[in-house]
Image (spheres, rainbow, N blue to C red):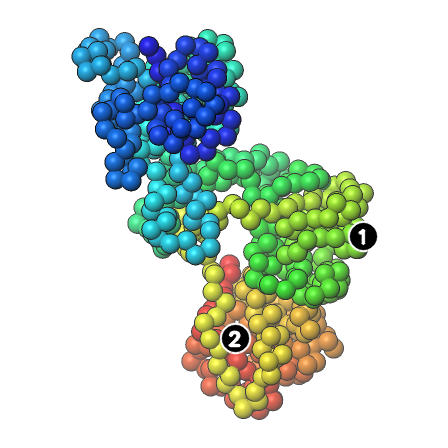
């Protein structure tokens, strides 16, 4: 009798696959919960405990880890000694292993998940079954996910003797277990590990990289679908994805309705407003020249009015968590506009990774805005002043260093980015803001090394500044702010972004 071993968490379409397996003359062996499910559909099933002689142990943690299961999978069918061992111990020959794993990745996405809950969802037996079946792919078919059931049914209908198909399924199984282990180790480490293993799966072929002479693709660390859904527009480019990710990371800093427009990996306009249309208009007016051909990100559902305003201008991409049907119809008037919905159910990467020509740089993501702040001048901020300063700080965190943001009424007025000295960034941001800088707020991603930036800010009428402390000339900077009547707030967190 030939057997298929079934042990699955996700039971999607399982009965359809098992119908095909049974019709081809296989007997079914299953773990208890899977066996119960299959019996409800009328299948005859042997439980693994009938094979092993042991009931499931220690609360179900041990079900399949037994020689009579693994010998039935690992035996080489063309090795007489292996077959003799199976016959001697009355071990069934298992030619198909259908197994998917506990949903560890989904569990750790939940808010306030406990370590105990996470550990209980680390699959041991399932991973072992997949690896054993994949190792013996010349003789055994491994099926590691419901997404492959249609392919498997087609393979079985064609006779089930294509070793290259079994090789492909083995590769998929090993890839899945590698990714699974990587997610677990990343979760448990919570910091940089000595050894980091990456297994990347290509999701998209891109036309080219930053420039036409460079090849590019979009890869992910797991076997899930991409973290975005594209409703319309041209195919995505390398630069589109880079800018879209930057835009999305920026707006996720905000709880109130916020729009960010990104150009060349820097924000050119950001605004918050309870009126979502007004938020977009304010963001666009922050720098309408730079906004041309930019990436729009919204942290709210996009409706009809905003869509009508967007299509008045040229943008490459708009990304949001959701869209009204009417908004999508309006966007369809701009055939080349890429309309994306970002999915919140995709696990974030554990680390930020950059490749050098030789080697890699790996760091944790910058998830902290500040722990606390300290007012350094006799001029004290109101609650509204602090809100405005925090708005500017949230934006400057996502601007290339040296970074300066000038804003007022939760709207960026001027942004200085990527300059080799901080005073030039200050000049660029203030010159862009112009007369609007009077009574506005200024944020810096790092400390001012000299008081000259404060002097320039005073000439433009800046009301308050927020910056990290730590310079040996902090006292000179504080004295300059005091002298010009500028509120100066210092934090301990620096926000370089290179």
Q: Quadrant of the N terminus?
A: top left
Number of numbered tags placed on the structure image: 2
Q: In this orientation, does residue 314 appear?
A: no
Q: Is residue 257 left or right of residue 115?
A: right
Q: Is residue 345 above or below residue 52?
A: below
At a point 66% along the width and 49% down the height, the residue shown is 322
Q: Which of the two residues, 146 or 243, is positioned nearer the viewer here?
A: 146
Mark 1 Cα-neighbour bin, 10 Å: few <14, some 14–19, many ≥20: some
Mark 2 = which residue? 467
- Quarter assignment of residue 452: bottom right
Determine the CA span between mark 1 and mark 2.
Answer: 38 Å
Find residue 54 and report its horizontal and vertical position in percent: 23, 28
Q: Is residue 111 left or right of residue 178?
A: right
- Quarter assignment of residue 2: top left
Q: Is residue 70 left or right of residue 294?
A: left
At a point 37% along the width and 15% down the height, the residue shown is 27
Q: Secondary structure at mark 2?
A: strand
- Quarter assignment of residue 180: top left
């Amino acid at each position: 009798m030939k057997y298929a071993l079934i042990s699955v968490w996700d039971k999607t379409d399982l009965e359809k696959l098992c119908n095909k397996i049974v019709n081809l003359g296989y007997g079914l062996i299953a773990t208890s919960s899977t066996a119960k499910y299959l019996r409800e559909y009328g299948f005859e099933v042997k439980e693994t405990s009938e094979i092993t002689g042991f009931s499931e142990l220690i609360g179900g943690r041990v079900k399949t880890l037994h020689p009579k299961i693994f010998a039935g999978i690992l035996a080489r069918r063309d090795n007489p000694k292996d077959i003799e061992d199976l016959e001697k111990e009355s071990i069934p020959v298992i030619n198909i292993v259908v197994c998917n794993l506990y949903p560890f990745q989904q569990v750790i996405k939940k808010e306030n998940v406990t370590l105990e809950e996470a550990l209980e969802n680390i699959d041991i037996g399932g991973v072992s079954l997949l690896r054993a079946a994949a190792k013996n792919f010349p003789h055994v078919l491994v099926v590691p996910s419901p997404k492959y059931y249609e392919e498997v049914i087609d393979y079985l209908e064609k006779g089930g003797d294509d070793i290259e198909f079994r090789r492909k399924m083995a590769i998929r199984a090993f890839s899945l277990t590698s990714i699974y282990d990587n997610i677990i180790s990343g979760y448990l480490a919570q910091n940089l590990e000595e050894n980091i293993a990456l297994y990347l799966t290509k999701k998209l072929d891109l036309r080219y990289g930053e420039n036409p002479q460079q090849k590019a693709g979009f890869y992910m660390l797991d076997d899930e679908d991409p973290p975005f859904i594209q409703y319309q527009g041209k195919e995505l480019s390398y630069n589109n994805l880079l800018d879209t990710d930057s835009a999305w990371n920026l707006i996720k800093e905000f709880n109130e309705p916020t729009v960010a427009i990104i150009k060349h990996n820097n924000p050119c306009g950001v605004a918050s407003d309870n009126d979502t249309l007004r938020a977009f208009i304010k963001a666009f007016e922050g720098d309408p020249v730079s906004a041309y051909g930019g990436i729009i990100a919204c942290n709210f559902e996009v409706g009809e009015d905003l869509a009508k305003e967007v299509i008045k201008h040229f943008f490459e991409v708009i990304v949001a968590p959701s869209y009204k049907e009417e908004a999508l119809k309006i966007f369809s008037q701009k055939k080349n506009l890429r309309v994306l919905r970002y999915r919140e159910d995709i696990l974030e990467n554990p680390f930020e990774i950059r490749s050098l020509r030789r080697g890699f740089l790996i760091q944790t993501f910058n998830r902290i805005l500040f722990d606390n702040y300290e007012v350094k001048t006799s001029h004290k901020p109101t609650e509204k002043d602090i809100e405005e300063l925090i708005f500017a700080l949230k934006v400057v965190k996502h601007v290339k260093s040296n970074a300066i943001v000038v804003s007022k009424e939760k709207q960026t007025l001027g942004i200085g980015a990527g300059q080799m000295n901080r005073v030039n960034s200050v000049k660029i941001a203030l010159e862009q803001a112009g007369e609007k800088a009077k009574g506005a707020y200024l944020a810096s991603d790092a400390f001012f090394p000299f008081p000259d930036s404060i002097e320039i800010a005073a000439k433009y009428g800046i009301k308050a500044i927020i910056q990290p402390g730590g310079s040996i000339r902090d006292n000179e900077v504080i004295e300059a702010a005091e002298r010009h009547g500028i509120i100066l707030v210092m934090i301990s967190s620096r926000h370089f972004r290179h």
